[in-house]
Image (cartoon, rainbow, N blue to C red):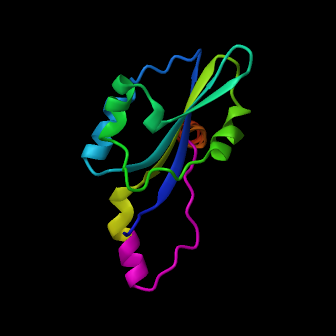
């Protein structure tokens, strides 16, 4: 199986307020073949700092039903407890986090073309949104001076 670029995304939810609001947007990305979710884990840090790790297959029936059509069964299992625990230390008490490994399926054909052309990617990096916002603001300030 040919895989495109794979990314890990970790999203925190202060106050343990994750209620699945992101699932419809995620499902739309999957249904449109923009991404393919390879694996997902959920962390919860309670007020005492105790960590609970939940695999996607361990969710209750209602929550699992939301994610069932989103995660690829034949690849799931790539994220480990040690992956999750490195982020758990960054969470404040009463905070949840979702870890997701996803393939940028939109880029798979381009990746295959590079490989078939004997090309090699020398550098690829996602620029954080905060950096883009800073650069945009600086460019805007320069343009008005």
Q: Quadrant of residue 60?
A: top left
Q: Quadrant of residue 31?
A: top left
Q: Position of residue 107 (x, y in %)?
A: 37, 62
Which quadrant of the rendered structure holds the N terminus? bottom left
Give whichever of 139, 90 is nearer the camera. Answer: 90
Give whichever of 133, 84 is nearer the camera. Answer: 84
Tell whether position 57 is magenta.
no
The residues colored magenta run 111-128
In screen coordinates, is 11 left or right of 105? right
Count of labels in the image: 0
Which quadrant of the rendered structure holds the C terminus? top right
Tell whether position 113 is magenta.
yes
Q: Quadrant of residue 128?
A: top right
Main secondary structure along the magenta-highlighted residues: loop
Say above or below: 92 vs 38: above
In screen coordinates, is 15 left or right of 39? right
Q: Is residue 134 visible?
A: yes
Q: Position of residue 48 (x, y in %)?
A: 74, 15
Say above or below: 39 vs 51: below
Q: Position of residue 58 (x, y in %)?
A: 47, 33
User: Which residue shows up at 63% across the image and 43% down it?
Assistant: 81
User: Which residue shows up at 48% across the image and 57% down it?
Assistant: 6
Q: Is residue 145 visible?
A: no
User: Which residue shows up at 64% across the image and 46% down it?
Assistant: 83
Give whichever of 21, 42 is nearer the camera. Answer: 42
Q: Position of residue 17 (x, y in %)?
A: 51, 16
């Amino acid at each position: 199986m040919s895989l495109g670029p794979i990314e890990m995304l970790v999203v925190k939810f202060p106050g343990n307020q994750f209620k699945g609001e992101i699932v419809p947007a995620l499902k739309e990305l999957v249904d449109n073949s923009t991404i393919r979710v390879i694996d997902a884990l959920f962390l919860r840090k309670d007020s005492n700092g105790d960590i609970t790790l939940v695999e996607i297959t361990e969710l209750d029936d209602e929550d699992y039903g939301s994610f069932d059509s989103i995660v690829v069964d034949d690849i799931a299992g790539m994220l480990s407890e040690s992956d999750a625990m490195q982020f758990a230390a960054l969470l404040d008490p009463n905070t949840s986090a979702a870890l997701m490994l996803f393939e940028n399926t939109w880029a798979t054909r381009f990746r295959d073309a590079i490989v078939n052309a004997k090309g090699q990617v020398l550098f690829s990096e996602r620029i954080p949104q905060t950096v883009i916002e800073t650069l945009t603001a600086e460019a805007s300030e320069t343009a008005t001076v």
